Image (tube, rainbow, N blue to C red):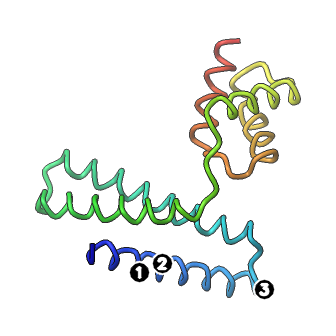
Amino acid sequence: MKAHDEIMVSTLRLLLSALNYEQIAMQHELSEEEELAVVRKEVKKRKEAIETLRQALGRSTTANPAEIESRIKKEEMELKILQEYLPPEITDEELEKLVDEAIVATGAKTVSEMGMVIGKVKSLRPDVDGAKTAAIVRQKLLGS
């Protein structure tokens, strides 16, 4: 339990530091949406770190596999803590509905128009996962 508390404290300190850094960069008090963007950025960093560490496990590296596993576990715990400060993610069904609306609104017919559709979805819901959105848009435009 104590180890989890230490990770919680260190994660929240890192988040506070990122928020302060962003506030200095923006030169004004952050709005709630700007704060959420910082939390999302930190979540994305953790997801990328986990992915990179998992790839490192599959390769022969000088790092000890046990060390890599413990770092993965730590990153996953930090990710879970950070996700508690985000609103719930949009469901796949809701995202598909948004993509359908964006395709109709933009009149997109081919994969080359994918950027317009993703831009429209992002303008409606800035918090959606870009990779997940891109995959659904690609599937729908290739299927039509």
Residue occupied by mark 2? 12
Name the image quarter holding the C terminus. Answer: top right
Three-letter code for the amino acid on which mark 2 is drawn: Leu
Q: Is 115 on the left or on the right of 43, as rendered?
A: right
The N terminus sits in image quarter: bottom left
Q: Position of residue 129 (x, y in %)?
A: 61, 45
Q: CA distance from mark 3 to mark 1?
A: 26 Å
- Residue 9 falls in image quadrant: bottom left
**Closer to the eye: label 2 or 3:** 2
Q: Residue at x 35, y 63 (%)?
A: 75
- 46 left or right of 115? left
Q: Secondary structure at mark 3?
A: loop
User: Can you give x and y, in whole percent of width and height, for residue 63 in the image?
Assistant: 14, 63
Q: Amino acid at mark 1?
A: Val
Q: Which residue is mark 3?
A: 28
Q: How many tags in the picture?
A: 3
State whether residue 13 is above or below residue 39: below
Instruction: State the SS at label 1.
Output: helix
